[in-house]
Amino acid sequence: MIPPPTASHRSRSAGFGSTDWTVILQCQGGDAEKSREALEKIVQRYWRPIYVFLRQKRLPPEQARDLVQGFICEVVLDRKLIEHADRAQGRFRTFLLAALQRFAVSDYRAQNAQKRHAGTWTLPLEAVERLDYSLKGAPETPEEAFDRVWAAQLLDDVLAELRDGYQKEGRSNYWSVFEAKVVDPILHGVAPPPLGRLCEQFGIDQEQRASNMIATAKRRFRAMLFRRLRPLVSQDADVDDEIKALMQTLSRRGAR
């Protein structure tokens, strides 16, 4: 049984290199199907931060791409890296990046990763090209880049869940007005449009109704974010600190 995190492992010190330990426990469990699904979640969650970390180490795109592919195939999958993760030993990010840097030490592995692992697992190249663009901006350490991309990916996941939920309910206008009034201004650094314009754009009859829709979407968004972040901390009271750390991480250079 993995013990709960101590104060030193909480959000203010751990930043956003932690992951949902319930997923890791599923990966370490005896159920083969649940372990496979959990491992897929971890790989999907971390390949982008790993790639950006390597690019901030000044590796060219092709070499960074090969290293990520080789690391995931040889270390994470073949050597079952996640099975050795132990919450009592500290942050998952530290554990993961230490394994990555040990792997990267070997020039042979770096130069032959793509050839040896071709057909086993492939890095999504279009997404990688978009990530190269995200590297432009104010200087940051590889660790800061890792945290920023992890946080941006978490935010993307929560926003996608919110959008999809409203679409399934037949209330897409809730998402549309929330996106226009709250999400886009934050992500793109622009002033929020007036409610009157949004009412005209989305066919909402009253500004008060639009305001209520935005407030409802905000509450749902916060509840979804709380559910994603709660497993990273030891108690409910720490989630607010985690949310603040998330926003501070994204505000360093912007989430995109």
Image: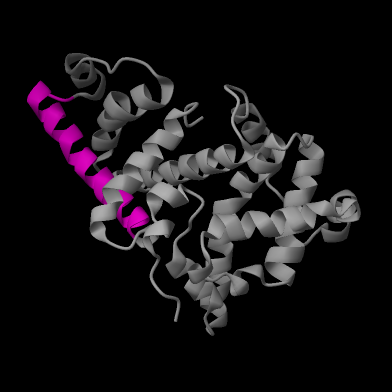
User: Picture coordinates of residue 155 (x, y %)?
Assistant: 41, 42
Vertical comparison of 134 with 24: above or below: above
Look at the image and give the residue range highlighted in magenta.
Answer: 204-230
The chief SS type of the magenta part is helix
Q: Quadrant of residue 219?
A: top left
Q: Quadrant of residue 222?
A: top left
Residue 197 located left or right of residue 24:
left
Residue 108 located left or right of residue 124:
right
Q: Nearer the viewer, residue 236 or 80?
A: 236
Is 205 within the magenta?
yes
Q: How many marks?
A: 0
Is 228 within the magenta?
yes
User: Picture coordinates of residue 187 (x, y %)?
Assistant: 41, 26
Vertical comparison of 153 with 191: above or below: below
Residue at coordinates 39% horizontally, 64% vertically from top-left? Answer: 6
Q: Nearer the viewer, residue 17 or 154?
A: 17
